[in-house]
Amino acid sequence: MPRLGLHLPSIRGRAWAERGPLLLIVAVVALITLVASAVPVLMPRVGTDAARDALERAGSRADLVITAPFEPVEATLGGEKIRPASGGDQSMEKAETVLGEDLSPHVRAPQSVVTTSELSVGGFGPGRVLFFSYLDTPQGEPEVTWTQGAAPGAWKPAGFVLRKGEAATVEVGLSEATARELKVAPGDFIAAVDRSSHTVNVLVSGIFRPVAPSDPAWAAGAKLLQPVTGADRVEITGLLSAESLPDARIALADQDIRRTITFPLDPAHVTWAGLDTLAADVARRKTSFNPISTGWESNYGFQSGLDRVLNTVHHEGRAAAEQARVLLIGLIVTAAAILLLTGELLARRRSRVLANARRRGASLTLLGAELILESALVTALGVALGLLASIVLVGDYIWTGALPAAAVALAGPPLLGLSAVSRLTTTRRSPANRSARAVLARTTLLRRIAVEVAVVLAAVAAFTALRQRGLVASDPEDTGGGLLTAMAPALGAVVAALILVHLMPVLLRLGLRAASRTRGSLFLLAAARAVSTAARPLPLTVLVLVSAMLTFSLTLAATTQAGQEEGALRSVGADARLDLVSAISPAEEIASREGVSAAVAALVVDSVKVSTIETWSSLHLIAVDPAAFQKLHGTSELPSLEASDGALPVLLANTDPGLRSGKPLTLATNGIQIPITDAGTAPAIGSDGEGFLIVDLAAYTAVMAEQDTEVRPNTVWVNGPGAGPALTDVVGDRGEVTTRAEVLQERRQAPLNVGVLGLAHACAFVLILLGILGVALTTAITAPARAQTHSRLSTLGLRRRESRRITLGELLPPVLLGSLGGVPAGIVLAQTSFAGLALRLLTGQAGEPSVVVPWLGLTALLVLVATVALTAWVESARRRQLRLGEALRAGEAS
Amino acid sequence: MLRVHDVSRTFGAGEHAVHALRDVSFEIEPGTMVALVGRSGSGKTSLLNVIGGLDRPDRGSVVVDGTEVTGLSEDGLSRLRRESISYIFQSFGLIPVLSAAENVGVPMRMNRAPVAERERRVQLLLELVGLGDHAQQRPDELSGGQQQRVAIARALAGKPRLLIADEPTGQLDADTGLAVMALLRGVVESEGVTVLVSTHDPVMMALADRVLQISDGQVTS
């Protein structure tokens, strides 16, 4: 009698009998659910960390800065200035209004700095210029100790009227270094003259020493602590107090004194989710800022590099997210193939039981419902465990990531089971007519070809989109590639698997043909078994996917790491770089130090204008000795920089093609126009990809000397293992030292890099686990047929050890072909897709990094070979437990 | 040629113990064809397995061509199977991807026979079983009867002294089965091999020199 309802005891019994494979499905679903639901949770957190890290590194570039002119000093009708009661005005309140409700929550309390235009100073040596500065922080004026004298006081009381032509007196404090430079003491007067030739009497009230020089408040007034020595002048700054500031206001013209209000960004209030909005708000404020359109208040200004910092980190974060998505898709596709393989094992093991159930009256629909109920429970358990693990490990989950693997686990095993039952129980007659049989075979072949062509076309479309648009578009408005584009590497791996699936039977038959010409039996029997099992595409597909995606993941990690090294080198320019503050280059002294192989001094100017009659570009200028520069970078010989037609020869790189049209070129710097000529292309240096030109330092110095301008190198590049320590020892406080090792470490510790590389390595680990599972499942699927064959061969005299060798010979070819075939596939996938993944955003290079294959890491695939050897040994040991007679009986029954 | 003495074999223990063989003793002369007859579950396969060394008896001894089978090690049994005993099964047991000739040559490959000698004997044996023209065909291109003939040729390839056939005609129709039995009869005559064949078909028994009846694990005649 036909069965009409679900038979729970049958479902329970079947599930218990096959608890091993079912638990395997639970484990794989749980693992993939964990990874796929935890990574989307982690990415915004990593993005937030990256944004905060970038903001910390950006320092003052991320500040919101409002420049506010002072309200004009009250004057009499005759134009005589009336001393205000205090230095303060309404600008601070106005600045806070300017920020508005959207930006205010992201900033810390503002710091105000009052600065003045320069005053010429006579009698203290040539080229001395004086500035006044007043610092005001939320905690008040930065704390100082008056080592001599006292803090500046008020020269005149409030309401004092300064007559026209009368020189005002302003009291200032000087740092110890500044006082030493000027050789002054408290009570001394400095006669200064402003831009309008008005005299200002500057009274030194005291000499101070900062209580905490590292206090960030001093960052805005660093010139207060140390005179700044330039090429042709020395800048000195005197400290004003709240009491002496009103005197400075009547002593100077209104336009010569201004307040800068700096709102430091608080990184703690920046999140990945709000990054885009914040950047847009800042950009909008920059373009639309115009609080008062007329009068003195029109000189208000708003500047910030915050939007650029945020846009950069947002771009990098999106690139990292897309790279993570590509890795995850590869992992999920491989896991899906493993789940199907487990489904195939289940189908084979229970096909007879299910076929008997059908013969006893259960319909295919009913059996399908029972199998779906079972797989739903198994899948739900796996998903629940994965989500639970995600909550435990990362505190949250995003369940949508688990859907693809769950769908395969839910539908795959029941469909494969029903297909096996259907084959066993449906008496489908083969047509007697030969041409009808051929038509049937052709139809089956065409169906398979159609599926394979669809996969290939999808892969081609995905790669085309990836290469043309990339996953991360440079235009922030462009969302870049979609899901299909992110699937490109995984689809490429599937295509590689299809190729090898078609190739393997051909290779094995060639092997079988060769084996048939041998004298012994092992090669022939192993090849025969291998050919028998090669017809199933899924095991080889799994192995190729594992190998290709493992290669892809590890190559991505290795390429990124190598790119970071290259990026750090390009960024620094050598093993270490000194940015000089002092006018004296210590290059020769550094070169003589132990552990230094080369030290090259250069003048680097961030922005010079290079133009033709038709176009112009802003480029970096590097004036350096070409031979020393070539030796430093180990590049091939540079084109000659010898002057030929009177123009200064230069090497250009990354420039507007219009500059290289052959038309006469002009270099403009410091108001000086220099005719230059294009002598060739400069070697790739620097990490920002911006254009630059290289010029011979000696020739440039000579040209500038003709214009009465002295050229002093401001950068020293040093190579050698002792470069960093040598620079630090020699330089002291004469400049800022940056080492390649520090930059590299900084990049490696950047949250996005840590996140992506961690995920790539985690994916590689999980892929290896899936590969081991794939080998074990393949062995389990083919085990019954192998046991039967080996039992029969044992009756012909096959020994145990020979049996083990034949097992190895049967199982190794697909593993070797899958592993070895997957490696070049993974490398090709890396080479064709990395350009679209924008790895340069994480490596800090100007262009995409060269693909680096981690050959040592790929030896992890040997684990799969070891798994084959282990399973062959275990299978042989298990066969030994079974007497041959029992094995043959089992074989007859199966 | 074959002496079975007081052999017993029990599967399981206690209440669920199944006594497959009980004190079985008999002898077979060389160059004879003996049919082992009994119903399904009577112990035919158990007895053939013990004789061929595929299973070990709980008690008793089996001597094949002067060799005590029950005392042999795994390697010794393998050697015995390569040199003295061959099997034919109901389901043929051919390797699907190998041609008929390659299947027949497998035992000779195991003994590392020279290629030329192997090829000569394979051709001889295929002609003996009437499949000289089917040497390059694979099992799935042959009928059931032809596959069993290939299996017989393979069993003879190692020049065995004793050929054990377990229901060799079980999957064949009556005519084909009779032809296979006739072939086995011919092999006894031409090769001088001793054949022990289990069957429950009375027609087949007529071709045997002797019939052994087995019932509930005991040989009764």
Image (tube, coloured by chain):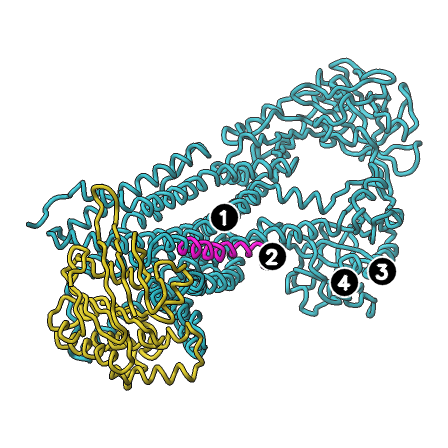
Chain colours: A cyan, B yellow
Residue visible at 82% across and 58% down in the picture: A628
Q: Between label 1 and label 2, give the one nearer the viewer.
A: 1
Q: Is A371 positioned to the left or the right of A494 in the image?
A: left
Sooner in the amino-acid sequence: mark 1 or mark 4: 4
Provide the residue designation for mark 4. A650
Provide the residue designation for mark 2. A849
Provide the residue designation for mark 3. A699
Sooner in the amino-acid sequence: mark 4 or mark 2: 4
- Identify the secondary structure beneath mark 2: loop
Instruction: State the image coordinates of residue A530 (x, y, percent, origin top left).
Output: 39, 67
Label 4 and label 2: CA atoms lie apart by: 27 Å
Label 1 and label 4: CA atoms lie apart by: 51 Å
Q: Residues within 10 Å of mark 1 (few under 14, many from 20)?
A: some
Picture disc at residue A765: 1
Residue type at tag 1: Phe
Are discs 1 and 2 both within one chain? yes
- Can you tell which quarter of the image residue A202 is in? top right
The answer to whether any part of residue B143 appears in the image is yes
Instruction: From the viewer's side, name the closer residue of A480 and A825.
Output: A825
For the record, the magenta segment spans A850-876
Are discs 1 and 3 both within one chain? yes
Residue type at tag 2: Pro
